Image (cartoon, helix red, strand yellow):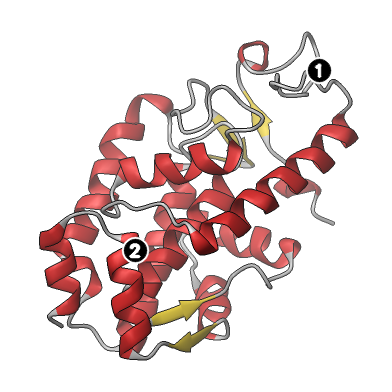
Amino acid sequence: MLDKYNYSYEGNELYCYGDTGILINTLNIKDEKELYEVERELVSLRTLELNSKPIQGDFDFKHLKMIHEYLFQDLYEWAGEVRTVNIAKNNLFCLIQHIDSFADAIFSRIQRNNYLTGLTVSQKLRELVEIFGDINALHPFREGNGRAQREFIESLAKVNGIDLNLSLIEKDVMIIACYESMNGNNDKLKHIFNKSYNILDDSKVKHYVNTLVSDEGIKNTLLSK
């Protein structure tokens, strides 16, 4: 049923062993199923670590790269690096020559919107959906985009008083929602976000701002709302 949501890649020889689709990895695992299981376990452990030791940044492209690097550091030498091949899932994700400019537009929007301060909860959720959809279309990494963008968007939500948990969403449901977002329809993403959050109290928001944000000016912006 989900065949049309499969990925296709250019330049597999740059990232994969021989004529396979198995990603070159630091553990030299050449069995697809084994690599999948090891990747899932290692990235899950790194994700848990982020609960107590989050990546501190300023919600820019660098911040997203740092999150990706942390999550996938145990397996891929290119963790945190922008892909050098084009990727499609029926539709093409952002072409490699436009990744930097599209990323600049996405993350500049966050800055221009004062990191979502001054918005109502419903407005923040709508904006988070838009940003999530745009980062999905950007798809800046060869692998692991979904997990990195989820961590990024959940962090941005936390500093805005929203405890967003997308990890409980079934994989197939999220795949279809992201696919439809690529085609200009965010309705399914909006439904997912609207059923996946709780409101944080002020003390928790302050904690997240201080642990997730590195720039003092941005901290002040978020805490003065």
Instruction: State the residue position of label 2.
Output: 211
User: Label 1 to label 2, Cα distance in Å?
Assistant: 41 Å
- Answer yes or no: do the residues labelled 1 and 2 have beta carbons within 8 Å? no
Q: Is residue 82 above or below residue 145?
A: above
Q: Position of residue 21 (x, y in %)?
A: 77, 23
Residue drawn at the location 18% of the way across and 55% of the way down:
215
* Residue at the extreme front: 52
Quarter of the image that includes the C terminus: bottom left
Q: Where is residue 121 in the image (x, y as percent from the top left)?
A: 34, 87
Q: Which of 136 and 38 is in front in this view?
A: 38
Q: Is residue 225 above or below residue 107?
A: below
Q: In which quarter of the image is residue 31?
A: top right
Disc 1 is placed on an element classified as: loop
Q: In which quarter of the image is residue 205?
A: bottom left
Disc 2 is placed on an element classified as: helix
Quarter of the image that includes the N terminus: bottom right
Residue drawn at the location 52% of the way across and 77% of the way down:
193
Nearer the observer, disc 1 or disc 2?
2
Instruction: State the residue position of label 1.
Output: 20
Q: In this view, does 158 lie to the left or right of 123?
A: right
Q: How crowded is mark 1: few (under 14 residues within 10 Å), some or many (20 or more)?
A: some
Residue drawn at the location 69% of the way across and 53% of the way down:
44
Q: In this view, does 46 lie to the left or right of 97?
A: right
Badge 2 amino acid? Thr
